[in-house]
Image (cartoon, rainbow, N blue to C red):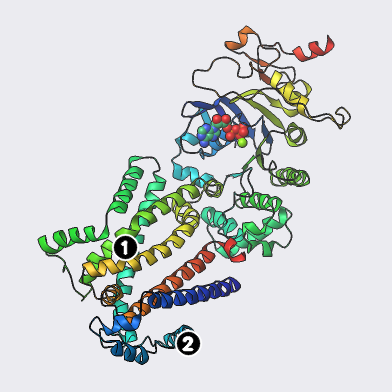
Amino acid sequence: MLRFALRRFVVALLVALTVMVLSFMLTRLSGDLAISIAGASATQADVEIIRKAYGLDRPLVLQFLEWIGRAALGDFGESFFFKARTADLIKERMPITLTLGLTGLILALLVSIPLGILAAVRENTWVDRLVQVIAMVGQAMPSFWLGLILMITLGLQLGWLPISGTGGPEHYVMPGIVLAFSAIPALTRLTRAGMIQALGSDYIRTARAKGLSRLSILGKHALRNAAIPVVSIAAVQLGFMLGGSIVIETVFALHGVGFLAWESISKNDFPVVQAVVLVLALIYIALTMAADLLNALLDPRLRAA
Amino acid sequence: MSDTLLEVRNLHVEFGDTVAVRDVSFSVARGETHCLVGESGCGKSVSSLAVMNLLARGGRRSAERLAFDGQDLPALPERRMAQLRGDRMAMIFQEPMTSLNPAYTIGSQMAEVYTRHRGGSRRAALDRAAGLLAKVGITAPGMRLGQFPHQLSGGLRQRVMIAMALMCDPELLIADEPTTALDVTVQAQILRLLAELQRDLGLAILLITHDLGVVARIAHRVSVMYAGQVVESGPTAALFADPSHPYTRGLLDCVPVPGKVRRDEPLGSIPGMVPRIRPGFQGCGFRDRCAHAAPVCAGEVPRQHGAGAHEFLCRLPPGWTAREQAA
Ligand SMILES: Nc1ncnc2c1ncn2[C@@H]1O[C@H](COP(=O)(O)OP(=O)(O)O)[C@@H](O)[C@H]1O
Ligand SMILES: [Mg+2]
């Protein structure tokens, strides 16, 4: 298990390095940074001064190594737009996004796992079909649209929840629901498929032949095997959620990292864009690694691999 | 306490519009080995799963009588049935590679059946498991308890399945083709093991096989199944002495007899396939493959007594085989 974990960690580091190179290159390749920083009205001389000031005249490799060295120490430079250190901006916004992401994931798992199990246990009955219809409708519904509907009903008409802004837990309910909804269809379908496969397997027949309780058969023997693909996809879904949080935080004016990404992209604030992309990517890499480790705990065959 | 442990009378199982088992009757006495034998698809597994109430989804069973130790099984709610399974009646399967849960250790899977039915500590259950692993011929049982199924060979896994089935000292062990998926040498070991356990523990075994050689070696009684029916049944010696159903004859002709089969000669087999039986099917299920088929075989088939206290389901007169050989 330890060897598996170590090897998985090395892979994660390599992926992280690749992401860093890519995110660095993308911002450099999307036009001359000195010109876009200087703005439309700047003279050639202004541009040159800026190029020097930001070190953009030095070789790319040097720029990259410097950026990576600083990034490793948590220094992403100054934001052009916010007149603040990028790292501080992210540190301030991150808890909001993580709270939203976690709320969304927990809600999604709480809904999709029981629904998936229910559909599998009642395979080919109306319960199963209803669950599948729900999953399909959920899939087809754009999150900004669901967000607007929730705002109108729960927010404006019923007045139960604030419709926008950053604040206490009540501000996370609607965005959390919207975020969860984006992951529920895939997770439900996967839980259902995994459970159906597990329930039809020989080892479940053995478990029944042993006279085990229904709870043990479903919860211990079937779910543990059905959970393996669900865990993998849950990590990927959480990655999508991070991306989705850009839309959702914007819709609900929740000032998290997603909102910051939207602001900095529209303001051409490249140190922030770069840092946000990197941080989101690192979170994603950490999540998939965590998922693989969890799966290795669930499935002993993976540990040997 | 009655001598008959399992009694099955006129068992009927349908899957949709397929009749998998019809009018099957047999009984297993305490301490005896009863074999269900027949080609693949004859309804052997379905019969045994119906006894355990483990039929796959869509399977419907009915029976005039289905009783374990005098208890009427269909009348039991599933919760009570589950209390019998694994405790007083245990089952092992044809597929040792997939019948154990890949996610849990051997020890965990063996212990849970004991703690479920008998309670007590996990520690005590593991000790018992180690003892049984040793009994079924597994060396270093303590080490095996901590291993996962994928770390064991097929033969070892089947031994684990047998040991697991013995955890609660069952009175009846149902073994559905326990050796079919294994190497020939391992097959022989497993069969010897079952025979030993039977003798030592006084187990009643319902052994399912398609191999008459196996039957000859360990069965006290045999029921030959074809197309969902028991076509011939009785004490092993009597049945082998006077096989009276043409299907039984056909099966016996497929068994290699030392000295009689030449090395380069392929083993015999009965031409044709087991038919799918639909509701309302009339007559003998074997008539399409039978060399002795006659128009009357499409009607009611009589159940007759053979010479040696055994029964068969055929129009042909008892003793026809002897006369045929004489002629
Ligand atoms: N789960 C199932 N669904 C539909 N039909 C089945 C199912 N299981 C068994 N059957 C039918 O029952 C017949 C007998 O199967 P089985 O008892 O498994 O044969 P065997 O004698 O090889 O053990 C098969 O030919 C098949 O048509
Ligand atoms: Mg079978």
Task: Name the residue type under label 2.
Answer: Leu
Residue at image position (64%, 32%) is B40
Query: Which quarter is ligand 1 in?
Result: top right
Q: Residue furthest right?
A: B259
> Disc 1 or 2, which lies upstream in sequence?
2
**Label 1, label 2: how many angstroms apart (C-alpha)?**
45 Å
Q: Which label belongs to residue A62?
A: 2
| Numbered disc 2: secondary structure | helix
Location of residue B229 by image quarter: top right
The chain to which mark 1 is attached is A
Residue B253 locus on image (x, y percent): 77, 24
Task: Name the residue type under label 1.
Answer: Leu
Residue B245 locus on image (x, y percent): 70, 19
Give the residue number, with chain letter if any, for mark 1. A107
**For this view, does A129 lie left or right of residue B284?**
left
| Numbered disc 1: secondary structure | helix
Q: Is residue A6 above or below residue B91?
A: below
Q: If the image is split into quadrants, where does the C terminus of chain A sit?
A: bottom right
The chain to which mark 2 is attached is A
- Relative depth, front residue between B279 and A115: A115
